[in-house]
Image: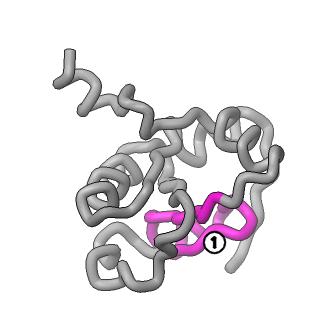
Amino acid sequence: MNLLKSLFGNDGTTLSAADAKARMDQGERLFILDVRQPDEFQNGHIAGAKLIPLGELNARLKELPTDKAILCVCASGSRSSVATRHLLGAGYKALNMRGGMAGWRLAGFAVKKGK
């Protein structure tokens, strides 16, 4: 069972888009980290998100806050799951948004286009 939890994020480090939005709406100051590529980001992202492609994450860790939770986002939740595990291992408080931007859009939440 622990293997399933580590693979699918059922260990308290994974949120649905609806749960993430509810936490933001309740005033939780999540740092939104988008780990997709720039063209994906420009086609639609969560307002206020910071783009750091997954391949650049390790070199740019100092750009991330240590005083609040980091919500990792990608297209489907796969790359953001990798980023979440990496950040947790580096001592950050990180959460993965299950379903990624596809789930966010499916839930009908606002998407910002461009940079």
90 displayed left or right of 46: left
Q: Quadrant of residue 109?
A: top right
Comparing 61 with 28, the one in front is: 28
Q: Is residue 57 above or below residue 69?
A: below
Query: What kind of colouring is applied to the model shown?
Result: one colour
Report helix, strand or loop for mark 1.
helix
**Residue at coordinates 66% horizontally, 34% vertically from top-left?**
19
Outermost residue to the left: 3
**Residue at coordinates 47% horizontally, 71% vertically from top-left?**
66
Q: Position of residue 54 (x, y in %)?
A: 35, 67
Q: Is residue 90 above or below residue 51?
A: above
Outermost residue to the front: 67
| Residue position for label 1 | 42
Q: Position of residue 42 (x, y in %)?
A: 63, 71
Comparing 48 with 38, the one in front is: 48
Q: How many marks?
A: 1
Q: Position of residue 17 (x, y in %)?
A: 64, 38
**Residue at coordinates 54% horizontally, 72% vertically from top-left?**
39
Asked whether residue 43 is drawn in magenta, I would say: yes
Instruction: Tell me if mark 1 has few (under 14), some (14-19) or many (20+) residues whose alpha carbon lies within 10 angstroms of its own.
Output: some
Quarter of the image with the N terminus is: top left
Task: Specify the segment rendered in magenta.
Answer: 30-51
> What's the residue type where badge 1 is placed?
Gln
25 displayed left or right of 64: right
Q: Quadrant of residue 68?
A: bottom right
**Residue at coordinates 81% horizontally, 45% vertically from top-left?**
26
Q: Position of residue 115 (x, y in %)?
A: 68, 80
Comparing 3 with 112, the one in front is: 3
Q: Is residue 96 above or below residue 90?
A: above
